[in-house]
Amino acid sequence: MNAEKERFTVFGFAGTHDALKAEETLLEARTDVALIPTPRALGSLCGFAVRVPAHQRDEALAALIAAGREPDGEAQIEDRVSRRR
């Protein structure tokens, strides 16, 4: 397996419940989402955040806002993604 870095947008939330509901919302919107530990770049928000590919940022944010789940923070990160060859 080869690990490559990719750009992601991470949305942070004030509480764990909010992060879990955001993940559910993004899954329903067919967004490629992952629940991850909140990166330091988002400060002292809850322990979980949702990560989406950077190219899906706008559609993910629109889905969250439409569902009444506006994030409390946002950061751009690079993360490793495992790829099978």
Image (tube, rainbow, N blue to C red):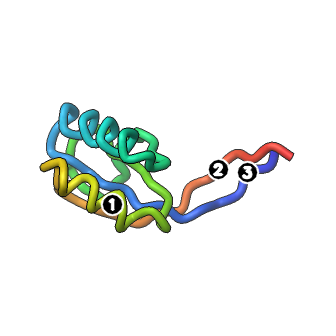
Dot 1 amino acid type: Ala
**Mark 1 or mark 2: which comes first in sequence?**
1
| Left or right relative to 40: residue 19 | left
Label at residue 50: none
At which x and y percent is residue 84?
Answer: 80, 43
Disc 2 residue type (three-letter): Val
Circle 3: element type:
strand
Q: CA distance from mark 1 to mark 2?
A: 20 Å
Left or right: 31 with respect to 44? right
- Residue 17: image location, x then y, percent: 19, 32
Q: Mark 1 or mark 3: which comes first in sequence? A: 3
Residue 33, by quadrant, is top left
Query: Circles 3 and 2: CB distance less than 8 Å?
Result: yes
Distance between the Cα atoms at labels 1 and 3?
23 Å
Residue drawn where x is 26% and y is 51% of the image: 12
Which mark identifies residue 3?
3
Q: Position of residue 6 (x, y in %)?
A: 60, 62
Quadrant of the drawing holding the N terminus:
top right
Residue toward you, 82 or 37: 82
59 w.r.t. 47: above or below: below
Q: Position of residue 69 (x, y in %)?
A: 17, 48
**Which residue bears the numbered disc 2?**
81
SS class of the residue under badge 1? helix
Residue 45 is left or right of residue 40, and the answer is left
- Vertically, is 52 above or below 33? below
Q: CA distance from mark 3 to mark 2?
A: 5 Å
Amino acid carrying label 3: it is Ala
The residue wearing badge 1 is 41
How many neighbours does mark 1 have within 10 angstroms: few (below 14), some (14-19), or many (20 or more)? some
